[in-house]
Image: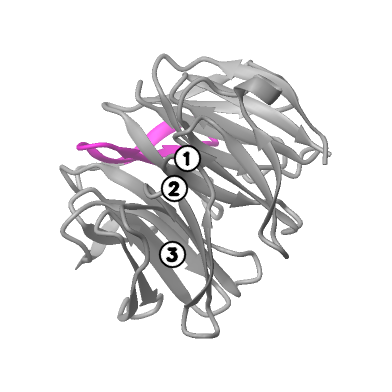
Amino acid sequence: MNIHKVDTFSGHRDSVYTIISDYTDHGFYSAGGDGFVIHWDLNKPDLGNLVARAGSSVYALALDKKSHSLWIGQNYEGIQVLDTVNNKIEKTSKITSAAIFDIHISDNKALLAMGDGVMIVMDVSSFAVQKHIKISGKSIRSISVNPATNEFASGDSECNVHIFDLDGFKLKKTIRSHSNSVFSVTYSPDGQYLFTTGRDAHLKIWNVAAGYEMIADIPAHLYAINDIVFSPDGQYFATCSMDKSVKVWETATFKLKKIIDRARHAGHGTSVNKLLWTTFENQLVSCSDDRMISVWKIA
């Protein structure tokens, strides 16, 4: 496996907390501590387009495939919805005064992970709150949906992973998964495994069909693991950490293949917060507290 840096995008004035695909192979959105939401094109390096200014910092973005609407989680200020075709804010709602750590849109439902331990369920079409689910006494940090089992998982700062039925939102299982906050929960592309990471710097893998039995516990990084993402073909996955590194692993064996850091590849200088693995020339995108977005070619 060969890795080299393709480019670095600069445009944010504060930490970059999140990046998501625009559902083309080459475009993505980023947001962070400055409240800026920027649209980027891997075909046109460092020519970002500022599409929105949130009233406060942004940890979470989600794009509705059907309407091409971008949901922006303004911490402590609620939700803005951007019409990406006409590039204008079409809806706003102060649904919470808490931080919004994750947003996941599935069918016509938006699942929002809140800093006060509540999961908010919204109807996408009507933009109405349908349900408040009190999950934790502390922050809910991440959500992942498994279409294969019609379930979703949430990870929180009470060290727990909760498994819910996606239709009725009934709690099916609670896993005391980590020794500290759970920062990321991600189902494998085939839906067979749940990958979890957290402040304890461990990567844990759970067998879904076996009642979420743990099959691997890997001390993967030196400090908190912020995110995990799979390659488009599912053969590899990458993790990023507060230890400033990105690591690439083989999915079939859970074996480490490469480390991307400052010493080896001119990597990030501070915490790496989020990852996006694109189909555009198999490029991996990372964002960091150093205000930069880096693009890596994985060959």
Towards the viewer: 95 or 149: 149
Left or right for 109, reference 128: right
Q: Which mark is residue 201?
A: 2
- Residue flagged by tag 1: what amino acid is it? Leu
Q: Residue at x 41, y 75 (%)?
A: 166
Read off the residue under disc 1: 222
Q: In the image, what residue type sits under mark 2? A: Ala
- Residue contact between numbered discs 1 and 2, judged by CB atoms under 8 Å: yes
Quadrant for the N terminus, please.
top right
The disc placed on residue 242 is none
Which residues are drawn in magenta? Answer: 71-91
Indicate whether residue 44 is drawn in magenta.
Answer: no
Q: Secondary structure at mark 3?
A: loop
- In space, the residues marked 1 and 2 are separated at their CA atoms by 6 Å
Question: Is residue 123 at least partly visible in the picture?
Answer: no
Q: Position of residue 237 (x, y in %)?
A: 65, 52
Mark 3 and mark 2 residues within 8 Å of each other at the beta carbon: no
Q: Is residue 163 above or below residue 124?
A: below
